[in-house]
Amino acid sequence: MHKLDESEIERKLNDARQKLFDARERRVKPARDEKILTGWNGLMLAAFAEAARVLQSRKSRVERMRRLRDGMRIFC
């Protein structure tokens, strides 16, 4: 059919992939809804708080929950 060796096919595919990537990079990126991420993080924190309460509040669990909470503040 076509008289291309494997290395020539690989080169053409890589060129095509690069062109597609370059075209995608020129497009406006879609916005992200950070509220959803914050909502999921809030659910996670509530679960950690409940676990700490049920498991008699071991200091390491409480401290981990506090660090997660403090890290989430950048999204709120």
Image (cartoon, rainbow, N blue to C red):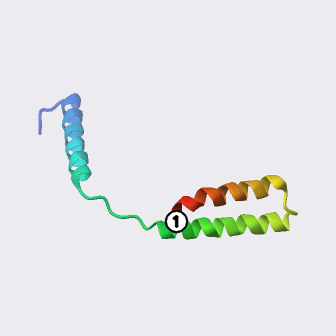
Image x and y of residue 59, in percent: 83, 54
> Pointer 1: residues within 10 angstroms few (<14), some, or many (20+)?
few
Taking depth in this image into account, of 27 and 13 the one nearest to the observer is: 27
**Rendered residue at 22%/29% (across/down):** 7
When asked about the image quadrant of residue 39, the answer is: bottom right
Residue nearest the observer in this picture, 64 or 44? 64
Placement of the N terminus among the 4 image quadrants: top left
Given residues 19 and 7, the one toward you in this image is: 19
Q: Which residue is mark 1?
A: 37
* Above or below 52: residue 67: above
Q: What amino acid is labelled 1 in the image? A: Leu
Residue 49 in picture, x, y percent from top left: 75, 66
Q: Quadrant of residue 63?
A: bottom right
Q: Does residue 67 appear to the left or right of 24 in the view shown?
A: right
Answer with left or right where residue 50 lies relative to residue 45. Answer: right
Q: Which residue: 12% across, 37% down? A: 2
Residue displayed at 30% across by 58% down: 29
Q: Is residue 6 above or below residue 34?
A: above
Q: Position of residue 69 (x, y in %)?
A: 65, 60
How many marks on residues? 1
Q: Position of residue 15 (x, y in %)?
A: 20, 38
Q: Residue at x 23, y 31 (%)?
A: 6
Task: Give the quadrant of the C terminus.
Answer: bottom right
User: Which quarter of the picture shows residue 66?
Assistant: bottom right
Badge 1 element: helix
